[in-house]
Image (cartoon, rainbow, N blue to C red):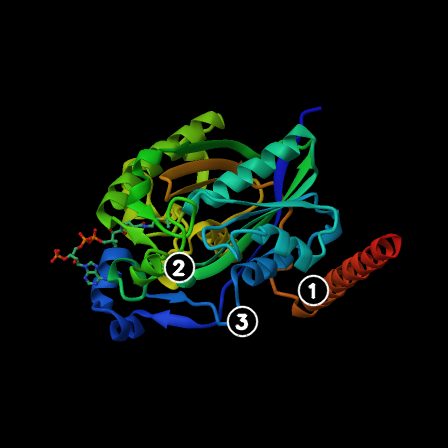
Amino acid sequence: MTRHAHITGWGMAVPERVLTNLELEQIVDTNDEWIVSRTGIRERRIAANTETTASLGTQAALRALQGTDVNASDIDLVIVATSSPEHIFPATASVIQDNIGATHAGAFDLLAACTGFIFALNMAAQAVRSGNIDKALVIGSETMSRIVNYEDRNTAILFGDGAGAFLVEGSAEPGGVLSCVMRSDGSGGDLLSIPAGGSFMPTSPETVANNLHSIQMNGREVFRFATRVMVAATRDAVEDAGLTLEDVSLIVPHQANVRIIEAAARGLKMPLERFAINVEKYGNTSAASIPIAFCEAWDQGRIRTGDNLVLVGFGGGLTWGAMALQMTMPERVITKVDRRRSRRIRTLARMRSMSRRVGRRVESLFLRTHAEAKT
Ligand code: ACO
C-alpha cells in the first residue's frame, strides 16, 4: 500500500518584543528608508532573556498539535531545523521532545541554515512514507538575535527570532508532500557563515575578540545566488510533482528580502499575489521563516484544503530546496492559541522530566553504594 505524508497540523510562536528599524538607527549606522527600500523589512521580533530556540520551538510544536487528535506521546520523531541551537549538543530537538512529553519519539537537529525546514520536512515525509514512522513533528526555530553582531549593519538589520512547526502524518490517502528538491553547493560556504566555535576554529579569546561567533555575510553574492536558485528549484519541484505553475495556488518562500521574492516572481512569471510575504514584520527568521509565513497565510484564508503549494528556500551552505505539497487537511476551526492546554502539557512534561532526573540520580547513588559495599 502506498503511503503518503500529510501536513495535518501547524503552529508558530514569536517573541513579543518588537525591534523596529527606528530603534536600529540608534544602534548601527543605518536608517529606516534604506532598510525598507533594500529589504522590505520594517521590524523583527527579538527573544527575551528567558526565551530560547527550544522554548519558542516548544510553543510552536504545542500549537501544531492543538486542534488535532494527536498527543505528544503519539509522536515518533521530532526534527528541529536550526542554525541557532540551544547547545552544540544535546540537540534542541531532544530538549523540545522532553518539554512536550513526546516520550516515544526519536529526536535530532538538522542544520541547513535557512533551507533547513524544507530539508527536515522532506526527511520526516520520507520516513513516514517508508512506513518506518507514522507521526513526526518538524520544527524550524531560531534565536538569530543571539548570533548576530549588532555592530555589523550588513546583518543586524536582517534577522529576527521565531519558530514554526508542522505535524506530519502518514495515510493511504493521496496528497501531502508531492516532491522535494534538495541541493547544496559547499564551494560557497564562505559567503554566509559563523566561522568560529566548531572544530575548524575552536573558541578562543581571539575568536571572541574578533566577533567570529556571529554571522558573516557577503550580502551581494548571497542575493545573486538566491534569485537564481529560487526560480530553478521551484520549477524542478513543480515538475517532479507532475504539476505546472498554474496548478500552484501559493508559493511560500523563505523570507529574507522582499526584493529576492520579487525577483523570483518575475523569473517564474507569476504575480506577487501568489507569494506569501511577511518579511516586513519578522525579518529573516532563517529556518523558521517558511512555517511562520505558512501559518499566517493559513490564518488569512490564503490556503485551503485541496490547494497545491510550493515551499522554497535558500541559505548558508550554500543550500537550497523546494517542496511541492497538496493540502489535504480538513478545514481547521481552531486557530486560537489554547494557552491553558499548552501550560498543562508543559507542566506534566516538566514533572515527568524531573522524576526521570531524580530517578537517574537515585539509581546511580544506589549503584555506587552497591559497588562500594562489594569492594
Ligand atoms: N544601512 C545603510 N546602508 C547600508 C547598510 C545598512 N544596513 N548596509 C549596507 N549599506 C550600504 C553599503 O555600504 C553600500 O554603500 P556604498 O554603495 O557606499 O558602498 C550600499 O548600502 C549598498 O550596499 P549593498 O550591499 O550593495 O546593498 P544591497 O542592495 O545588496 O542590499 C542586502 C544588501 C540587503 C544585504 C542584500 O544584499 C541581501 O538581502 N542579500 C541577501 C542576504 C540574505 O538573504 N542573507 C540570508 C540568507 S539565509 C541564511 O542562511 C541565514
N-term mark: 3 or 2: 3
For badge 2, the amino acid type reads: Ile
Quadrant assignment for ligand 1: bottom left
Give the structural element (helix, strand or loop) at label 1: helix
Q: Which mark is residue 147?
A: 2
Labels 1 & 3 near each other (Cβ < 8 A): no
Q: Is residue 363 above or below residue 199?
A: below
Labels 3 & 2 near each other (Cβ < 8 A): no
Q: CA distance from mark 1 to mark 3?
A: 16 Å
For badge 1, the amino acid type reads: Arg
Q: Position of residue 75 (x, y in %)?
A: 70, 46
For badge 3, the amino acid type reads: Thr
What residue is disc 1 on? 346
Q: Depth check: give the residue in front, 167 or 277.
A: 167
Q: Position of residue 209 (x, y in %)?
A: 31, 63
Q: Nearer the viewer, mark 2 or mark 1?
A: 2
Q: Position of residue 309 (x, y in %)?
A: 48, 40
Q: Nearer the viewer, mark 1 or mark 3?
A: 3
Q: Depth check: give the residue in front, 351 or 251.
A: 351
Q: CA distance from mark 2 to mark 1?
A: 27 Å
Q: Depth check: give the residue in front, 375 or 137.
A: 375
Q: Depth check: give the residue in front, 36 or 316.
A: 316
What residue is disc 3 on? 50
Task: Judge the density around disc 2: few (<14), some (14-19), many (≥20) Cα neighbours within 10 Å.
Answer: some
Say which quarter of the image contains residue 199. Answer: top left
N-term mark: 1 or 3: 3
Q: Is residue 179 left or right of residue 98?
A: left
N-term mark: 2 or 1: 2
Labels 2 & 1 near each other (Cβ < 8 A): no
Q: Is residue 264 left or right of residue 179?
A: left
Give the structural element (helix, strand or loop) at label 3: loop
Task: Judge the density around disc 1: few (<14), some (14-19), many (≥20) Cα neighbours within 10 Å.
Answer: some
